[in-house]
Image (tube, rainbow, N blue to C red):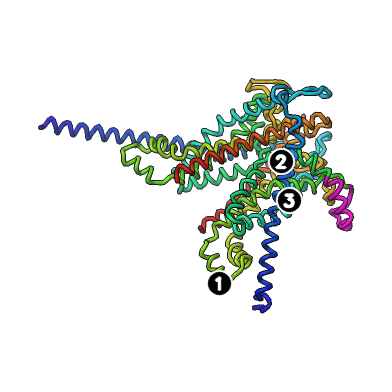
Amino acid sequence: MKGGGFSYWRRKTSNAFVTILFSSSVLIVLLPLILIVGYLFFKGASSVNLNFFIHRPAPVGEHGGGMGNAIIGSVYVVGLASLLGIPIGLLGGMFVGEFPHNKFSTLVRFVADVLNGTPSIVMGVFAYTVVVLPMKSFSVLAGGFALGVMMIPTILRTTDEILQTVPTSIREASLALGVPYWRTVLSVVLRSAKSGIITGILLAGARVLGETAPLLFTSFNNAFFSYSVTQPISTLPVQIFNYAISPYRDWHRQAWAGALILVLAILIVNFAVRVFSRQRFDQTV
Amino acid sequence: MAAEIDDIIVSERSRDVQRKTFIRADNIFKAVIGFFAFLVIVILVWLGIQLYESSQLAFASGGIWRFIKGSTWDPVTGVFGALPFIYGTLLTSFLSLLIATPLGVGTAVFLAELAPKWLKRGLQPLVELLAGIPSVIYGLWGIFVLSPLMANTVEPFLMDRFGFLPFFTGYPLGIGFLTASIILAIMIVPFIISVSTEILSTVPVPLTEGMYALGATRWETLKKIALPYAKSGIFGSIVLALARALGETMAVTMVIGNTPQISKSLFDPGYTMSAVIANEFTEAASANYLSALIAIAFILLLVTLVVNAVARWLIWRTTRMK
């Protein structure tokens, strides 16, 4: 043992030094967050007005215009994605959560995690080959498919985790009353896990709401208001991307405004989820 | 009397029937939800097959290795080699890990071991927020804020001080490998933080308390107990972040300069696998071109599958000990 390493003074200073080092890493990590949110408000807020929400994009050189069609498009595509993602994620998660300790469930869980880590652009290519190519057209359907597949693992894993936290005694109480197992799961277990599951679904929705890469060549883009599922549609993230890489100052302003709205929407969902799950926590305590 | 007994028998029998329907209903229920769980596996297999089949055209002349090793990407003459993109993806991913790992692990240690509870509860949502900001918004910020900063301040400074190194030569454009890596680092750091914090919180309290009782400082406890215990899990979180970095698309596309070249200088513009798919997919006019892009997606899928599997295994190995 080195005598010097155990001197009181030296140990204290190295402890203080390391504490400062770790604390400063927090500051460095949070700096970009502050800068990004700051810039969003600084650059975006001035271009957000009523026109932004109700108008479609104006042609180059013409002042004004908005992202009304892109906002509707985003809601449309995410809504369609939910139709695919929620049932598969929820029911699959019910199986994995109710029968957690067998090889099949372990495999499903692993595959869901791997699917969750698959790059979103790859999901876009997947949707392109299975939806766009056969239909011979970019469409809302293709975008919804890509985002829906991305929602599945998130919803499955949160449902899985929540169901495992539901006490076995609740299930046993229901079974002891003569309620069949399927009924027990649907009306007793699911009910007590309800807010957790809704949280998972909302978070999955918020996550795919901001996705751009899988939509570039599935739902593509559209300069007009469109409501057909077989037609391409404009979405907020894709619109932001197209405007950001354009050479026009006016479009840059619009991009910042769109980004601000997108982040606010995601923030609101996250905040709602937080309040929601805290409520649940208060009730059980 | 006999009638009563009959009644009882009948009701017993009907209860039996009822129970059988119950069991049948339960089995049907189990089969249905099991089927939906199975669909997840189906989707992954389907994804793999679909991409593999669609990329056959690109592998037709000389196979997958020739495609990977080809350093020329020229859609006009129909020559497709993926090496510049693989180089760009690997370079930016590793560089971003180099930046993000110390910051992420440092923050995780701070949150898990050093911060008072109220501070931890305040900071964790912020870290989650950092993870929740869409990629395209990082890209937007990258183009209009980070890139000018890099071109005017950071890159000239690096050239001035470290210009003798081959990585810091060339012209400070503000778009290129270095800017892309910094954006990537900002984006992946929350993954390292959240997983590592969770892993560090699985370190058994009696072990650390024993260490404190022996008079050890916080740093000594961390170094001797917590970090060795959480080592493989923290490593797992870094590998998980690597998987994210490899596949990250929009932000990188917007700041890397989109030039298929293999350059030593970090200031030079480059290209990544995901960026070339994002940029050129809708422009791919010929079947060969499209197939080459899908082939890149297929390779990206394979790489992230392996990296993710390794990460999950490492994390599972640590949390299982709990």
| Badge 1 amino acid | Leu
Q: Chain of mark 3?
A: B
Q: Are marks 2 and 1 in contact (CB under 8 Å)?
A: no
* Residue that numbered label 1 is attached to: B214
Picture coordinates of residue B290, whole percent (x, y): 73, 33
- Same chain check for tags 2 and 1: no
Residue B233 visible to an observer of this rendering: no
Picture coordinates of residue B77, whole percent (x, y): 83, 35
Magenta residues, start to end? B149-171
**What residue is rendered at 64% in x and 52% in y?**
B193
Cα distance between the residues tagged 3 and 1: 39 Å
Assess disc 2: are there few (<14), some (14-19) or many (≥20) residues with their C-alpha within 10 Å of its C-alpha. Answer: some
Label 2: state its secondary structure. Answer: helix
Q: Chain of mark 1?
A: B
The N terminus of chain A lies in quadrant? bottom right
Give the dominant element type of the magenta stretch: helix, strand or loop: helix
Residue B91 visible to an observer of this rendering: yes
Q: Are marks 3 and 1 in contact (CB under 8 Å)?
A: no
* Residue that numbered label 3 is attached to: B96
Label 1: state its secondary structure. Answer: loop
Name the residue furthest left: B1
| Badge 2 amino acid | Val
Cα distance between the residues tagged 2 and 1: 45 Å
Q: Are marks 3 and 2 in contact (CB under 8 Å)?
A: no
Apparent side of residue A148 relative to residue B138 in the rendered image (left or right): left
Picture coordinates of residue B97, whole percent (x, y): 71, 52
